[in-house]
Image: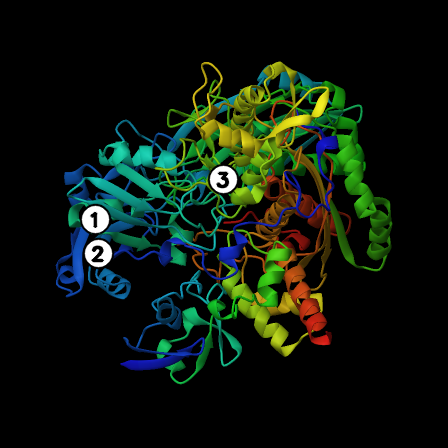
Amino acid sequence: MKVEININGEPVQREIEARQLLVHFIRETPGLTGTHWGCDTSNCGACVVLMDGKPIKSCTTLAAMCEGHEISTVESLEVDGQLDPVQQGFHEKHALHCGFCTPGMLMTSRALLNENPNPTDLEIRTAISGAICRCTGYQNIVSAVRWAAEHEAATQEA
Amino acid sequence: MATTENLPSATTERPIGFGRLKRKEDARFIRGQGTYLDDIRLPGMVYGAVLRSPYAHAKILSIDTSRALAHPKVAAVVTAKDLETLGLAWMPTISYDTQAVLAGDKVRFQGQEVAFVVATDEYSANDALQLIDVDYEPLPAVVNARKALDPDAPLIRDDKIGQIDNVASPTWEAGDEEATNRVFAEADTIVKRDIIYPRCHPAPLETCGMIADFNPRTGQLNIYNGNQAPHVHRTVYAHVAGLAEHMIRIRCQDIGGGFGNKVPVYPGYVCAIAASIVAGVPVKWIENRSENLMSTGFARDYIMKAEMCAKDGKITGLRVDTLADHGAFDSTAQPTKFPAGFFHIVCGSYDLQASHVKVKAVYTNKAPGGVAYRCSFRITEAVYLVERMTEALAMEMKVDPIDLRMRSFIAPEQFPYETTTGWTYDSGNYAKTMRVAMDIAGYEDLRREQLQKRARGELMGIGISFFTEGVGAGPRKHMDILGMSMNDGADLRVHPSGKAVVSISAQTQGQGHETTFAQIVAEELGIPPEDVQVRHGDTDKSPYGLGTYGSRSTPVSGAAVAVVSRKVRDKARLIAAQMLETRPEDLAWEKGRWYVKGDPEKGAMIEDIATRAYSGEEMPPGLEGGLDAQVIYDPPNLTYPYGAYIAVVDIDPDTAQVTVRRFIAVDDCGVRINPMIVDGQIHGGLAEGVGIALMELISFDEEGNCLNSSFMDYLIPTALECPEFELGETVTPCPHHPLGAKGVGESPNVGSPPAIVNAVIDALHETHGVEHLDMPCTPARVWAAMQGRPEPPQ
């Protein structure tokens, strides 16, 4: 079947098997291997992307279900050489080690801050609780999201 | 030796050497531009998938691959018969056992590899697995290690000539049995406990896999594979596949976590290599999550009986009898001479009079492994045991568990200290570290709070753990793996402009080597870390070494980088002397510069010395041009990091849910090169410890079906289960490491489970009479213990 999905603002059209998962559709698009696959069961969150602004797990979403929807991946965060504050925050606060969960964590955090620009630590922990990180123990991820929130608030005031 | 005075303050943002330098590797990871295995696509590449056994123990009567081969997208189906013709049906394990690459005679654990399908795409390869018809005759399975030696237990390893029972390795002993008997005879208090460290799994977020690319025209085998020891893997493939070692190149690009799981060679790797050799095209195989949890290296599974005794208020002796469950093949990761790894470090941080340790291992119908899940060769099991026993002894003696530890610690003046099982601890001041932890925790206040809560019917527990690890294996006189010394190389080249490339044999899986190792060169040579590129993960471009596990990167590879930097510095001194028209002995070093003693204005910067080294100018007599060096570092001893951990838990009296409210971790890992990365390592290991103590378990039913084969059932802590960790530090430099560093990666995983379990038992002992509870402390298992029915994990 033919599917057209808007990924990071670009229409991507491809002939696929009806059973193809969104994560595979995205990863087969040149340059977009930032979205990872980690568990098969929607537990780990390495595959999180935004669909129309909401975080979804692309390993348990069929590509065919995304026809006509807008998908945003980690590659969309940096715009014109300017990193998104969540990307900066992860670097500033050492919120990543191996980097495998990072794209999913970044997209989850981006979605949180879009909805709630000033989350509490518990709200951050709750928002990222659908994603597993084996390396960081989450503490620095929480700090990074808080850093991004504060940074965005400061930018908006200025 | 480095001293703490040399270190920049912890707040220095961009120091020339040691300090909280932000990571170089982040730039690609935060953009989603890492190169993990599945991100690599080669022209003409085909995809492999593994058919696995549904039974834990069964004879294979026949395998019919004809329907799979008829699938239009299937290129090949490989079975044991095909591998036999290539001599690849069995492979050696790290522990000198053998393991079936594909099962031919029978299957010995659920999830064992039976056939390997190669197809033009991943979906079709998996489809074709359903088209292979295997006729099995199920056999009774041995699941419980304690029953593996029963006279009527079915024989698992009937493939091994002379194997008449399920003993995987005979009893191995350390310490002095008679002396231990004497100490126990003289003791005032003795406690006994049966303690299980259950089977768990490192479960890195990226699963295991390989791309094998054999070029039949040149005979070159290119391998892409995230593994923790690429050089050793290459040597193993050379032996197993009979290929020339110099024609094999392994590239480990970015690795999505390892934690010990990516140390071994797995059957899927051998299948991918064999398929590529036969097909002459690149073959990619990546396991799914269930395959990772069911078939690749598990951790722990030690069943321990222990006795500990005290006299005059001090711990005096320890006796341990352990049964190790190795699964169907003994592929335990450990140095050759140590069949129980470093388990005999079980005397812990205490000045014991005697100890005796016995370990026997059995085969069961479970997946092989025995890898160190963020642990140095069974030290996690040892620390768990001694810290549980110390707590039990304090309970029996009705003394505060910290008081008992303080009275029993090895004293600072006793270092170097020889333990009763033969380890030589390098340095330590245990009481000081314990006191720092007590101060951060507010220990006395916590005990008061606990009493008040208990009076109100609330369940609060405080658990202590004080661990000593031996990491950085290891000295070639004492240890090797598969006959290879546990040394690491480093190769440093300073370019004419003064920028440098350092090549190392350690293999990062997220530990930040590209930053830390650049900082070591920076500290030693004064070249800014951003001007030092760290090259690793490519056997063609890095020196031989044993890789990254057992917290050995900084203790061994880090030392190699320090030593090679000093070698370059020494050469730079000779060149500088010629430039400055003086004698080398008249020069003094400051970071980045040799200068004339007594005339500090007169000097040569390292970059100018580098330029000179490659220039047309004359070199000092007998000295070659260029500014580079290489070393192989042989550590004189292990390093012995240690730490004091305190856990505070609350238990819901109605649901038995355990919440880790606070966790205080004070680590002494010697000198810290990048304290930010060290803290990050500690956070990560503590989270794994929370998981192991409360959630993570690989268990089986009586027929050997694995009950935890996905992240739906193998529970990993999320941000909601982990507390905000409270860290502290003391710094006792390692006397023999060139930088005074000791290594830290595994300490938090080693030290945290006993603190949490001790806290759970502390919460329940007074009110519910609980004396012991095995991990994981899930609500159901804690509830059973509260009702007086604690059960070992299945």
Which residue position is annotated with label 1? B275
Which residue occupies the foreground of this view, B642 or A146? A146
In three-dimensional space, the C-alpha distance between marks 1 and 3, rounded to whole angstroms, equals 30 Å
> Residue A15's x, y, as percent?
27, 77
> Mark 2 = which residue?
B118
| Chain under disc 1 | B
- Which amino acid does the dot numbered 2 rest on? Val
Q: How packed is label 2: few (under 14 Cα within 10 Å), some, or many (20 or more)?
A: many
- Mark 2 and mark 1 in contact (Cβ < 8 Å)? yes
The reply to whether label 1 and label 2 mark residues of one chain is yes
Is there one chain holding both mark 1 and mark 3?
Answer: yes
Q: Is residue B85 above or below residue B636?
A: below
Q: Residues within 10 Å of mark 1 (few under 14, many from 20)?
A: many
Left or right: B99 with respect to A50?
A: left
Disc on res. B678: none
Report whether B123 appears left or right of A144.
left
For label 3, the residue is: B372
- Where is residue B317 drawn, in percent x and y? 67, 24
Q: Chain of mark 2?
A: B
Q: Position of residue B116 (x, y in %)?
A: 24, 52
Work out whether disc 3 and disc 2 sit on a shared chain: yes
Where residue B19 appears, x then y in whole percent?
A: 66, 42
Q: Is residue B439 left or right of residue B246?
A: right
Q: Residue at x 14, y 62 (%)?
A: B67
Badge 3 crowding class, 10 Å Cα cut-off, few under 14, some 14 to 19, many 20 or more, is many
